[in-house]
Image (cartoon, rainbow, N blue to C red):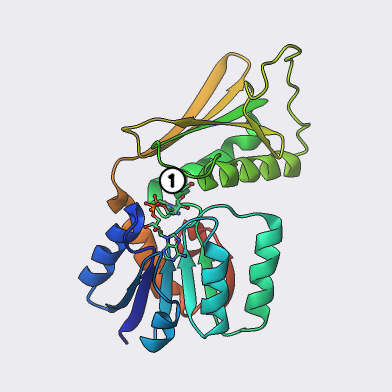
Amino acid sequence: MTLRVAVIGAKGRIGAEAVKAVEAAPDLELVASLGRDSELTELTDARVDVAVELTHPDSVMANLDYCLSNGIHVVTGTTGWTEERLATVRGLLDAAPSLGLLIAPNFSIGAVLGMQFAQKAAKYFESVEVVELHHDRKADAPSGTATRTAQLIAAAREAAGRAPQQDPTTHELPGARGADVDGIPVHAVRLRGLLAHQEVLFGDTGETLTIRHDSLHHSCFMPGILLGVRKIVDQPGLTFGLEHFLDL
Ligand SMILES: NC(=O)C1=CN([C@@H]2O[C@H](COP(=O)(O)OP(=O)(O)OC[C@H]3O[C@@H](n4cnc5c(N)ncnc54)[C@H](O)[C@@H]3O)[C@@H](O)[C@H]2O)C=CC1
Ligand SMILES: O=C(O)C1=N[C@H](C(=O)O)C[C@H](O)C1
């Protein structure tokens, strides 16, 4: 069956790449491309099966509300997720139990693997910090990927019975130690010329381990987006993270 797909945020950096990827996929048909000034009714008019939502933290909730209230599955990579927002989308999904929503902090296979490796390493090291580096147009900090990575590490440490890290800093310029995500320091660099990069630094007596991932072009996110589109139609409810659709 050919899936009818829309891209919301079709003129953005990742959205424009997603338009090309959907157009090139033989089993998918691009039936709508929405920008900031588009009407969401274009989605229902075009009888969209799956919307790929790649916009902005300020826009994503209204887009998801419309889609999930109108029978449209959603794959989104937009950032800015909080527990409160997740509770809201769970409510929308409860009211539309046949629909699926994939929220993927990162669609690239390397980034997903990096997160999994970090989760695996977490219990073995006393110290851990996350450094994410992105292009200079990024709206949010820290990145969705870094936030998720830190959450996974914190959960793995807790499950292993590891005590929270002790920070010896007594004299600090505010912000110098980064943001605190569940007890893990997360540092955000913004630099023209970069795309999306992350280092997870682990340390213990006499050794360190660095897990680094680099996204060099938006094409790296496309296989994950296409996989999400194909899988979400058979996966009702909320799926958080592309790893659930990968045979890891
Ligand atoms: N999960 C992943 O693998 C990835 C996620 N992202 C995330 O995707 C989002 C977009 O990133 P970029 O493409 O770099 O940003 P961008 O600013 O280049 O593109 C966003 C586009 O969405 C449009 N837009 C905003 N509100 C809209 C609305 N209500 N309806 C339709 N279009 C709307 C904007 O006009 C813009 O063209 C960000 O949250 C970013 O962090 C980006 C790359 C990979
Ligand atoms: O804004 C970006 O570019 C990216 N956003 C996502 C994030 O915040 O983690 C994914 C990737 O890092 C690119």
Image position of 86 (left or right of 16)? right
Figure label count: 1
Image side of residue 217 versus residue 235, left or right: left
* Quarter where residue 81 is shown: bottom right
The residue drawn where x is 59% and y is 22% is 203
Q: Quadrant of the N terminus?
A: bottom left
Residue occupying image coordinates x 58% and y 47%: 148
Q: Residue at x 66, y 54 (%)?
A: 82
Give the x, y percent position of residue 147: 59, 43
Give the answer, above or below, for where 210 lies relative to 248. above
Image quadrant in which you'd find residue 190: top left
Whether disc 1's CB lies below 8 Å from ligand 2 is answered yes
Helix, strand or loop at label 1? It is helix
Q: Residue 229 appears at what percent x and percent y?
A: 40, 71
- Reading the image, the residue beneath label 1 is 111
Can you say whether 219 is above or below 189 in the image?
A: below
Nearest to the observer: residue 32 or residue 214: 32
Q: 164 or 123: nearer the eye?
A: 164
Q: Indicate the position of residue 150 as horizontal and vertical percent values.
A: 61, 40
| Residue 69 horizontal/vertical position (percent) | 57, 82
Q: Can residue 80 be seen by looking at this rendering? A: yes
Task: Quadrant for residue 52, please give it.
Answer: bottom left
Q: Quadrant of ligand 1?
A: bottom left
Q: Amino acid at mark 1?
A: Ala
